[in-house]
Image (spheres, rainbow, N blue to C red):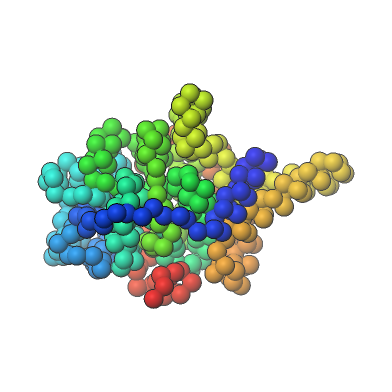
Amino acid sequence: MGGTALYLLFFAIASLFPIKQKKADHIETLRFVVLIPCYREDEVILEVAREALEQRYPADKFDVVIVADAFEEATIHALKKLPLQVMGVRFEVSTKTRAINYALRQLPEDTYDAVCILDADNIMESDFLHKMNQALNQGYVAVQGHRVAKNINTSFALLDAISEEINNQIFRKGQRVVGLSSALIGSAMAFRYTFFKQMMQEVEVVGGFDKELEIRLLRDGHAIDYVDNSYVFDEKVQNAKVFSRQRRRWLSAQIHYFGKSFLPATKAFVTKGNIEYFNKAIQYVQLPRILLIGLVSLFALSSLVLGIPTLTKWWLILWGVTIAALLLAIPRQFYIPETLKALFFLPVGFFFMFLSLVRIKGANKQFIHTKHTYNAFQIKRKLFFHQKP
């Protein structure tokens, strides 16, 4: 836990500095396919589809493709009225990788230069493709955008939004500032098309799609860029039940990929100096932030109650380091009265996170769907729209 706290603090401090971006000699306007794999997302997909078409990017240089798995016929019919491509499917076993690979097999060869992956609830800011295009022109094959909260309508949604921003600062921006690769997050991502298609032919996973991509990219020496000012709005979980189900899936994937990557990553670091791959494996062994702060707080309180001064001292130091790291990583727009209220729900979040850990067995082999309901027109608060005029 001490190592995790110091790791978080180091990259939280690093995230306070700007990322030094490469300069492209020539900017080519790449042709994008915006790929949106969806499963039973009838409630939000029409609005997401309309918003996806509103990019300030040449209309002849991007297409929107929706893989609509197990959708209502009425939704499919409505989508087909829009200037986009709809692939209606019903997989026996539904997974994100299966939907993406299906689309890649159906799309024409030699048509696209880049692919952008979104979730069914994601709303891109109007210049998102333009910013992804610039990053890909700098020589990267993989780029992560900045995913931000679409909603903070409940305390759990606000805590989820803060958690994502902490991860953005520490595991994306902070990593790039010191020259390491950004973490992927499963959506708001862009890749060179041919590279992505070839890589995806070997990928068939139920959970942890983004982690599978990270391992393959970093193992093979490909850096992952992060564009901090390229925003995609994403729905945050609104209650404890959804929080528990989602975190169970995430924890299972993290443990699975730690087991899969740690020994190969250590070997690659020792024999080839592949620090990127090793750094990723180190990230997978770390406790999630809410579990870390909960356990450190419990141990500090227990040693204080039991009257063990030496232990109390070290646990309090560790608690202080952890809190400092998290406070540095929280963007200032979250320092609002609502956040103080939401903090009272942290023990509930810790309980459900711990419960997810106990019930983790088999979660990475099951398709656990998170239903989305929050719509784009509800993005009203300036708090979450970071784009500068």
Residue 227 picture quarter? bottom left
Quadrant position of the N terminus in the picture:
top right
Across and down, in percent, residue 122 comes to 34, 60
Residue 155 picture quarter? bottom right
Across and down, in percent, residue 284 comes to 51, 38
The residue lying at 23 percent from left, 65 percent from top is: 57
Vertical comparison of 59 with 180: above or below? below
User: Can you name the residue that lies furthest to the front here?
Assistant: 25
Left or right side of 332 for 100:
left
Vertical comparison of 171 with 359: above or below? below
Residue 159 visible in image: no
The residue lying at 29 percent from left, 62 percent from top is: 130
Left or right side of 119 for 270:
right
The residue lying at 39 percent from left, 76 percent from top is: 389
Between 10 and 241, the residue placed more toward the observer is: 10
Total label count?
Answer: 0
Left or right side of 39 for 110:
left
The residue lying at 67 percent from left, 55 percent from top is: 324
Across and down, in percent, residue 337 comes to 61, 72
Across and down, in percent, residue 185 comes to 41, 49
